[in-house]
Amino acid sequence: MMKRVMVGVSALFLLASVAGCSNMNQTEQRVGSGAAIGAATGAAVGVMTGGLGIGTGALIGAGVGATAGYIIDQTADD
């Protein structure tokens, strides 16, 4: 039962995040996607290492990912 709830919540979150990107400019999209990828990676590292925990890893990863997305946007040739 819990697994079904988590899958449903994840699908709803994914749908909302994709729909929310339609009004964003290119910089906002890159920063947002960097933050999302960083948060997922940070949470995974937090689970595997066990040191910081999921939440802390996700927060650190989101910050690093958002910063990387911004830097990539500023250096990209469009």
Image (cartoon, grey):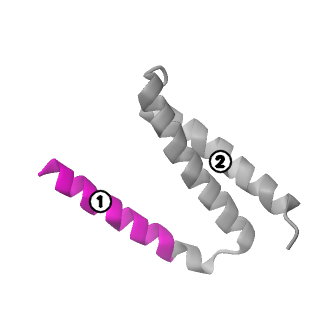
Asked which quadrant contains residue 62, the reply is top right
> In the structure shown, which secondary structural element does the residue marked by tag 2 occupy?
helix
Question: Does residue 74 appear to the left or right of 22 in the view shown?
Answer: right
Location of residue 20 with respect to 54 vertically, above or below: below
**Crowd rating for badge 2 (residues with CA inside 10 Å; few <14, some 14–19, many 20+):** many
User: Residue at coordinates 52% horizontally, 73% vertically from top-left?
Assistant: 20
User: Residue at coordinates 26% horizontally, 58% vertically from top-left?
Assistant: 7
Question: Does residue 75 appear to the left or right of 56 in the view shown?
Answer: right
Q: Can residue 50 be seen?
A: yes
User: Residue at coordinates 42% horizontally, 30% vertically from top-left?
Assistant: 47
In the image, which disc is placed on residue 65?
A: 2
Please check the rendered image and state whether residue 7 is part of the magenta-colored stretch, yes or no.
Answer: yes
Please check the rendered image and state whether residue 22 is part of the magenta-colored stretch, yes or no.
Answer: no
- The residue labelled by disc 1 is 9
Q: Which residue is at the front of the view, 4 or 19?
A: 4
Residue type beneath disc 1: Val
Location of residue 11 with respect to 4 vertically, above or below: below
**Crowd rating for badge 1 (residues with CA inside 10 Å; few <14, some 14–19, many 20+):** few
Q: Earlier in the sequence, mark 1 or mark 2?
A: 1
Callout 1–callout 2 Cβ contact below 8 Å? no
Q: Where the C terminus falls, by quadrant? A: bottom right
